[in-house]
Image (spheres, rainbow, N blue to C red):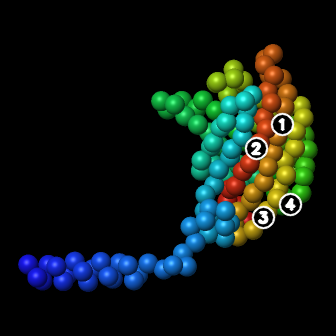
Amino acid sequence: MKINYYLITVLSLFLCLSCSDDDNDNPDNNNNNTDIFVRFTANGTDYDFPDPAIAQSANTTINGSLTENGVITESISIWFPNGFTTGTFQFTGDFGDPGDYKVFYDSVDLGIDGFAPTTGEVTISSISNGFIEGTFFFSGMDNGVSVDVTNGTFRSFTLD
């Protein structure tokens, strides 16, 4: 019985000593934060797309989606020209044209079936340590539904 007590004591002591007090679990420290996301408010409803995919061909895209029962109910794609830099850019252009900043939004909740806005912009605030971060907003009409997306933020991996 004494051996078990000593063994538990030694193991507990080892676990306590192996933990470092300089660990940084602060999610605001971008050097240690590996969270990726796309978040925004659409017509007053908050959306959080964890773990967006990033793809690159003629443009680079960050793609987020939410599913219910295996069906995509919300999706967003933010398009950047390859070789993008930090700065603020208007959402413009035809999706067939490479080189523009674009956004594409689809929402079952809002009754939107593939929406490209008439106004809006994206700000790329940081490209470092393998991540791209920024903010966005846009608005427009789709099938008679007014769409207003505000408070948009994103953080994703880069492919460079």
Q: Earlier in the sequence, mark 3 or mark 2?
A: 3
Q: Earlier in the sequence, mark 4 or mark 2?
A: 4
Name the kind of residue labelled 4 in the image: Thr
Residue behind mark 2: 152
Q: Quadrant of residue 128?
A: bottom right
Residue 25: x percent and y percent? Answer: 56, 67
Name the kind of residue labelled 2 in the image: Gly
Considering every residue shown, the one lying at the far top of the view is 144
**Quadrant position of the C terminus in the picture:** bottom right
* Nearer-the-camera pick, 60 or 139: 139
Residue 49: x percent and y percent? Answer: 62, 43
Q: Quadrant of residue 130?
A: bottom right
Q: Which mark is residue 127?
A: 3
Residue 31: x percent and y percent? Answer: 66, 70
Q: CA distance from mark 1 to mark 2?
A: 9 Å
Q: Which mark is residue 138?
A: 1
